[in-house]
Image (tube, grey):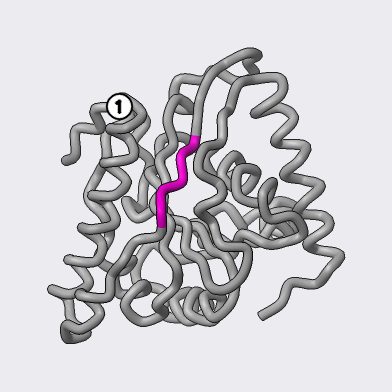
C-alpha cells in the first residue's frame, strides 16, 4: 500500500514543523535512528508517557526517512470531529475501537506488508513514566505479519508543560528484535504473550540505558 506523493510531502512538512518546536525550540534528542530500515515493513513499538508521543515520534522517524509515512492506529473518539478527523487521517492515523477491531487489525496487517507503523503496546498512557504490561494483540500482529520490530524508548516528554522552551526529552531506537525462535512456536495466545514480553523487555532495557527506572507493572 503506497501513500500518495502529495500526502507524503504534507506529512514530511508537518513533522518538520513539529520538529522545529521539539528539537530546535526545545531539546528533544533523537538517538539510534540509523536502526530504522528505510524500506520494508517496520513496526515501531514504544512506551507511551504523553499525548505528544504521537506527534514527536513521527518527527523522530520521518526526519531520517523523508517522504515516507508512519501509520498509526488511534482511538475512534479522536475522529468524531470531521475537521480533526481529516487532519489525523492525512497524517496516517486511522480509528480503532476500544474492543477488538477486526477491520483495524486487517488494515494493520495490510500496512505491514511494506509500510512503517507505530504502536504503543501498553494501549494507554502512563504519565508517571512507569512501563505497563504489553497487549497480547501486539504479539499476534508481530507473529502474523513478521515485520522488522524496532523497540523504542521515550523519556522526559511527560514532564513538559506546554508550551515550553529549552525543555529536555529524548527518544532512543534500539536494534531490530529477533523473534525467529518464537516464530517456530504455534500461533496461539502463549506465543503471542512471549513475543510481546520480549518487546516490553527490550523497551525496559532501553529505558534503563537512559537512566530511567521504569518500574514495570
Label 1, on which residue?
212
Quadrant location, the N terminus: bottom right
Q: Is residue 101 above or below residue 136?
A: below
Chain part drawn in magenta: 171-175
Residue 172 within the magenta-colored segment of the rendering: yes
Closer to the camera in the image, 99 or 172? 172
In the displayed structure, does residue 1 sit left or right of residue 139? right
Q: Position of residue 192 (x, y in %)?
A: 22, 72
Magenta-colored segment: predominant secondary structure: strand
Q: Residue at x 38, y 41 (%)?
A: 125
Q: Residue at x 41, y 53 (%)?
A: 175
Check the image and name the residue furthest to the right.
Answer: 6
Secondary structure state at the residue bearing disc 1? loop
In the displayed structure, does residue 65 sit left or right of residue 115? right
The image quadrant of residue 36 is: bottom right
Quadrant location, the C terminus: top left
Q: Residues within 10 Å of mark 1 (few under 14, many from 20)?
A: some
The image quadrant of residue 163 is: top right
Q: Position of residue 24 (x, y in %)?
A: 71, 23
Q: Residue at x 19, y 39 (%)?
A: 216
Q: Position of residue 110 (x, y in %)?
A: 54, 81
Q: Residue at x 36, y 29 (%)?
A: 210
Check the image and name the residue furthest to the left.
Answer: 190
Amino acid at each position: 500500500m503506497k501513500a500518495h506523493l502529495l500526502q507524503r510531502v504534507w506529512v514530511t512538512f508537518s513533522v518538520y514543523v513539529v520538529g522545529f518546536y521539539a528539537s530546535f525550540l526545545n531539546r528533544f534528542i533523537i538517538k539510534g535512528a540509523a536502526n530504522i530500515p528505510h524500506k520494508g515493513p517496520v513496526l515501531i513499538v514504544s512506551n507511551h508517557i504523553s499525548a505528544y508521543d504521537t506527534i514527536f515520534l513521527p518527527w523522530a522517524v520521518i526526519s531520517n526517512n523523508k517522504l515516507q509515512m508512519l501509520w498509526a492506529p488511534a482511538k475512534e473518539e479522536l475522529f468524531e470531529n470531521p475537521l480533526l478527523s481529516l487532519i489525523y487521517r492525512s497524517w496516517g492515523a486511522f480509528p480503532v475501537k476500544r474492543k477488538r477491531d477486526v477491520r483495524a487489525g486487517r488494515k494493520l496487517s495490510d500496512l505491514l506488508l511494506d509500510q512503517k507503523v507505530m504502536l504503543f503496546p501498553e494501549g494507554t498512557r502512563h504519565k508517571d513514566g512507569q512501563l505497563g504490561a504489553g497487549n497480547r494483540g501486539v504479539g499476534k500482529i508481530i507473529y502474523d505479519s513478521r515485520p522488522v520490530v524496532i523497540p523504542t524508548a521515550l523519556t522526559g516528554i511527560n514532564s513538559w508543560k506546554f508550551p515550553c522552551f529549552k525543555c529536555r526529552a529524548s527518544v532512543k531506537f534500539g536494534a531490530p528484535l529477533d523473534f525467529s525462535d518464537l516464530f517456530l512456536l504455534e500461533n496461539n495466545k502463549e506465543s503471542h504473550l512471549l513475543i510481546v514480553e520480549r518487546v516490553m523487555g527490550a523497551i525496559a532495557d532501553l529505558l534503563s540505558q537512559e537512566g530511567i527506572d521504569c518500574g514495570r507493572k
